[in-house]
Amino acid sequence: MGLPLTQRLGFSIGHVLNDLTASVWFSYLIVYFHQVMNFNNNLAGYLMLIGQVSDALFTPFIGYESDRSRGFCGLGRRKSWHLIGTYCHKGALQNCNSGVIKSWDVVNRELYSFDVQKVYTI
């Protein structure tokens, strides 16, 4: 038959929240690249494009390998890969934010003092 309605709704809500999280992360990265790293528009755009293309290329391979694996620590094959991805993501975030703690004030000031007039006058 298929999945029950509650599971389909749960997966749908999870997918929407995943996309919202990605949107917030990409918005933060654009501000970070411009305000903290002082990258120009092209470089920031290329970096975002590289991330999206690498995600599109590696996702099928990760899915294929997760189908073939047995998992570890009794977690099963999907949760094992999820755990590995969580630790990789945690390491990436720590690496991204190390050394820019002093710059958080600049980012927070720009995020919380967003003025619509600035957008239209650029």
Image: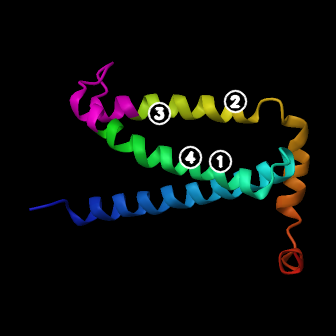
Q: Are marks 3 and 4 in contact (CB under 8 Å)?
A: no
Q: Given the image, on which type of amino acid does mark 4 rest?
A: Gly
Q: Position of residue 42 (x, y in %)?
A: 73, 56
Q: Is residue 79 magenta?
A: yes
Query: Which numbered disc flags the more N-terminal residue, 2 or 1?
Result: 1
Magenta stretch: give its range.
64-81
Q: Given the image, on which type of amino acid does mark 1 rest?
A: Leu
Query: Which numbered disc flags the more N-terminal residue, 3 or 4?
Result: 4
Between disc 3 and disc 4, the foreground one is: 4
Q: Which residue is drawn at the image coordinates 81% and 49% (left, top)? A: 39
Residue lying farthest to the front in this orientation: 42
Q: Given the image, on which type of amino acid does mark 2 rest?
A: Asn
Element type at mark 4: helix
Q: Position of residue 60 (x, y in %)?
A: 33, 43
| Quadrant housing residue 59 | top left
Between disc 2 and disc 1, the foreground one is: 1
The dot on residue 51 is 4
Q: Which residue is drawn at the image coordinates 33% and 37% (left, top)? A: 61
Q: Are marks 2 and 4 in contact (CB under 8 Å)?
A: no
Between disc 2 and disc 4, the foreground one is: 4
Please determine whether, in this image, residue 103 is positioned above or below residue 28: above
**Which residue corresponds to mark 1?**
47
Q: Are marks 4 and 1 in contact (CB under 8 Å)?
A: yes
**Which residue corresponds to mark 2?**
95
Residue lying farthest to the top in this orientation: 73
Mark 2 and mark 1: span between their CA atoms?
16 Å
